[in-house]
Image: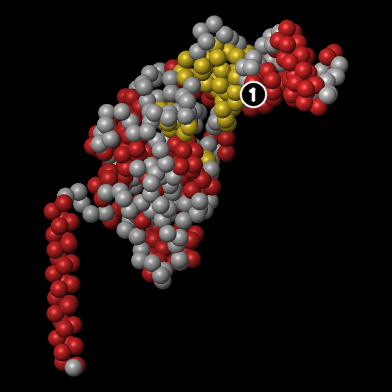
Amino acid sequence: MPNKTHSVFRNAALLSGLVTQAQLDVAERELREDILVEDGGSEVSEETLADRLVDTTVITRYQADQMLTGRNKLNLGPYLVTDFIGQGGMGQVFKAVHNVMGRESAVKILPVHKSTPEAISNFAREIRTQAKLDHPNLVRAYDAGQDGSVHYLVTEYVPGTDLRRLIRSDGPLTMQQAASVMMQSALGLHHAHESGLIHRDVKPGNILVTPEGVAKVSDLGLAGFMNEGTDDPRAGKIVGTADYLSPEQIRNPHEVSNVSDIYSLGCTLYYAITGKVPFPGGTPNSKAQRHLAETPWHPKRFNPEISEEFVEVIADMMEKDPASRIPSAAEVAARLEPWATEVGVSPAPLTKSPWTPPPLPTGAEESSQDTDAGRAESDELDSGRQESASQWSQGTLSGGAANQETNQVSNRRTTSPLPPPLPLAQLPQKTHSDRTAAIAVIASLAALIGIVVGFILRGLL
């Protein structure tokens, strides 16, 4: 039996204040009795003892793992840390419970090794940013504080997962599910925009979705206020994630506005409904060029079940010219509402999509286009990389260079075994009459060609 005086786990458990000596003794006695019955032994390992305390809900799995390494401080101020959630753009995120109120929360901490004066200033800015907002579709800020050298932000804990993980696990959403999640996200963003705030990093990983289908926009760490100018520490820098950057964020970061979030939300909707980022593969710089000069594959190529009217909403959100884009997040929500309400008042439960994946491409060029979205989405551009607008301008397309690249893309696609997709920018207009007329013209031409071919065949015979 291990010497309790030298037991790393036992000492850490007692010092943490989460486990009493009586609880340790009871768990150890019960385990020793079980071991005697099973194999005649009597020794209880630290790992087995930790497992028993987890099974009896004395401590959580995360807390047990920490104690096994000798760590005994598991609180941040009045918050008891119970689990590790993940790594965010600004720091690590933990699940915690308030000692007095008992409310579960998410606690984001700024790592000590990153606690430079600039990082602390940016972190404090994020805290003040979230404190200004209160909306059911935005992650609410509850508290903030400092424990020793550790700075932390406390927000509401949202059970479930983020949209990126959900789609990578279960596949694309249905039209109704995607409309519901994006409509809610747009309503949250509209509240932020009304408060003068631009998110600047809207993407699937920053939209949390509960098992009931409630969506909340999170991670405002890159957010900035409109008309703040040089007071914004990220002014003039490209911040965000390459797969979802708006063209104006790339051309001139000083021109970022609320419609920049709408473009990013459009890219997110494209991903939600197809399981693909708009421009998969390549480097962050090449993605930026494509946001400026190219249009994505038509969403129906990956999801034939979506309607043209729904695709038109995506196209209007992803207009490259900000002036031609849907002007407000409130209007985005209104445009999506017809599909979101088809499944009832409550959001649709997020179950696995019944759609099958699109067929594998046969052309070499298309194979490079259809790379895994998850890998592409990890290319992030933030203030930590110190990417400036001038650095980006060296690799972006403008004027003749843009036209040249477009022509090269067009020439490559003409040699592909599959026909080129219909780009979003070339979608039909928003009236059924135009589409009906086009169909009628095509039908008439087909009939005329058939008559001509018939006459030729008769002459040959």
The residue lying at 74 percent from left, 8 percent from top is 21
User: Where the N terminus falls, by quadrant?
Assistant: top right
Q: Quadrant of residue 250?
A: top left
User: Where the C terminus falls, by quadrant?
Assistant: bottom left
Residue picked out by circle 1:
61
User: What percent of the width, then of the height, locates residue 152?
Assistant: 57, 18
Q: Is residue 407 visible?
A: no
From this view, report whether residue 4 is shown above or below residue 320.
above
User: What percent of the width, then of the height, locates residue 414?
Assistant: 38, 69
From the viewer's perspective, tell me whether residue 321 is left or right of residue 16. Answer: left
The residue lying at 77 percent from left, 17 percent from top is 33
Amino acid on which the number 1 mark rests in the picture: Arg
The residue lying at 45 percent from left, 66 percent from top is 362
From the viewer's perspective, tell me whether residue 243 is left or right of residue 3. Answer: left
Q: Nearer the viewer, residue 291 or 212?
A: 212
Q: Quadrant of residue 201?
A: top left
User: What percent of the width, then of the height, locates residue 147?
Assistant: 63, 13
The residue lying at 54 percent from left, 35 percent from top is 383
Report crowding for label 1: few under 14, some 14 to 19, many 20 or more residues within 10 A (C-alpha).
some
Q: Nearer the viewer, residue 297 or 175?
A: 175
Secondary element at image label 1? helix
Q: Quadrant of residue 263?
A: top left
